[in-house]
């Protein structure tokens, strides 16, 4: 979903920077506060960040005959919400822009918005809605991570369509970009959802106490899952 | 998941990944595909829409000098991530086991 270096013209690259910067700044504030207030969340934060690192490094082949990569941000969104997840995404995006010529510094604002803000926000809302609807916990995680991944690529398509409207308008342009990104991404998003659910299961098994304190899951859900496990 | 039927989340994950690989094999055996990155395909769409007039106004400050070095850096990224995940999950697991051992010993003693 990375928009390549230099591929967003004025004024779009500035606009996306303007939208992303305050979110990431507030995310840094929230992250510092969380670490200070509850030290025990730090390892989980590291795991969520590392999860983004691993998943976004894997370029996977898809049904369309091209390759793309998952985002890994759904996990962070479920655990810590979109504010903090945006910071995790920026770290990865900067690494890839500086060392790998993947994405770019001028498009960092736009890429942060799609991968670090829009995707995680969708994931967070889906998780909240799914748990509220009393879906199984792992199914909720699956839906949240899958849709967070997919939404990221839809937003990238929108960003490119806005910057490069075709002769017949922004909508046809969006269709052209979505044909590249959104369809390629469907199987990848599903794999990401399943892997995230699995990862979540292990975190529940080991540190359900921290999840409870962070209000990610409820006591009754944990009790049900633990009973099922034993 | 559905414990009563003995299906675990791990089984579902394996099945989905298996299906993913099968799809790849099916697609790659049916015709020629470039398997290029979706990002660079988007570049093609841009040049189609603009009639090839768009010139990127900024280029990457550093380009990995070869495909090998690029994959090295990608592998490094994955390795760092897996290391951190493995470290903490392993650490928690050991703490959990030590707690169980401790309480078992207390009951005996």
Image (cartoon, rainbow, N blue to C red):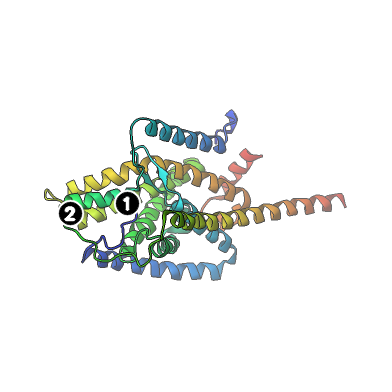
**Label 2 element class:** loop
Badge nearest the viewer, 1 or 2: 2
Above or below, B65 against A75 in this view is below
Asked whether, in this view, residue B73 is left or right of residue B86, the answer is left
Residue A18, percent across and down? 29, 68
Q: Nearer the viewer, residue A135 or B38?
A: B38
Whether tag 1 and tag 2 are in contact, CB under 8 A, the answer is no
**Label 1 element class:** helix
Asked whether, in this view, residue A14 is left or right of residue B21, the answer is left
Query: In terms of image quadrants, where is residue A13?
Result: bottom left
Above or below, B55 against B46 in this view is below
Q: Chain of mark 1?
A: B
Q: Which residue is mark 1?
A: B39
How packed is label 2: few (under 14 Cα within 10 Å), some, or many (20 or more)?
few
Gap between marks 1 and 2 measured at Cα: 17 Å
Residue A74, percent across and down? 44, 51
How packed is label 1: few (under 14 Cα within 10 Å), some, or many (20 or more)?
some
Q: Tell me which residue sits at (55%, 33%) in the image.
A: B2
Residue B88, percent across and down? 61, 57
Q: Residue furthest top?
A: B5
Q: Nearer the viewer, residue A36 or A55?
A: A55
Q: Nearer the viewer, residue B24 or A135?
A: B24
Q: Tell me which residue sits at (30%, 65%) in the image.
A: B59
Q: Which residue is mark 2?
A: B52
Above or below, A106 against B104 in this view is below
- As drawn, the label of residue A33 is none
């Amino acid at each position: 979903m990375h928009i390549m270096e230099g591929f967003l013209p004025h004024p779009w690259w500035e606009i996306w920077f303007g939208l992303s910067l305050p979110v990431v700044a507030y995310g840094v504030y929230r992250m510092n506060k969380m670490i200070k207030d509850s030290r025990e969340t730090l390892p989980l934060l590291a795991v969520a960040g590392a999860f983004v690192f691993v998943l976004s490094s894997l370029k996977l082949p898809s049904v369309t005959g091209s390759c793309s990569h998952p985002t890994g941000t759904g996990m962070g969104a479920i655990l810590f919400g979109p504010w903090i997840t945006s910071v995790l995404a920026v770290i990865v995006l900067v690494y890839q822009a500086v060392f790998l010529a993947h994405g770019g510094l001028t498009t960092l604002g736009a890429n942060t918005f799609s991968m670090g803000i829009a995707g995680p926000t969708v994931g967070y809302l889906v998780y909240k809605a799914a748990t509220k609807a009393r879906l199984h916990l792992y199914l909720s995680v699956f839906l949240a991570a899958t849709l967070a991944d997919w939404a990221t690529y839809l937003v990238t398509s929108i960003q490119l369509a806005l910057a490069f409207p075709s002769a017949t308008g922004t909508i046809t342009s969006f269709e052209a970009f979505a044909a590249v990104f959104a369809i390629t991404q469907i199987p990848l998003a599903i794999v990401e959802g399943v892997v995230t659910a699995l990862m979540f299961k292990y975190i529940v098994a080991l540190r359900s106490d921290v999840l409870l304190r962070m209000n990610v899951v409820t006591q009754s859900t944990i009790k049900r899952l633990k009973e099922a496990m034993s | 998941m559905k414990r009563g039927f003995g299906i675990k989340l791990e089984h579902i994950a394996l099945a989905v990944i298996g299906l993913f690989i099968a799809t790849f094999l099916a697609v790659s055996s049916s015709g020629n595909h470039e398997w290029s990155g979706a990002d660079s395909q988007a570049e093609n769409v841009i040049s189609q829409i603009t009639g090839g007039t768009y010139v990127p106004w900024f280029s990457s400050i550093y380009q990995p000098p070869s495909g090998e070095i690029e994959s090295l850096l990608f592998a490094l990224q994955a390795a760092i991530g897996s290391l951190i995940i493995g470290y903490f999950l392993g650490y928690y697991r050991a703490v959990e086991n030590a707690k169980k051992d401790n309480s078992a010993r207390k009951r005996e003693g």
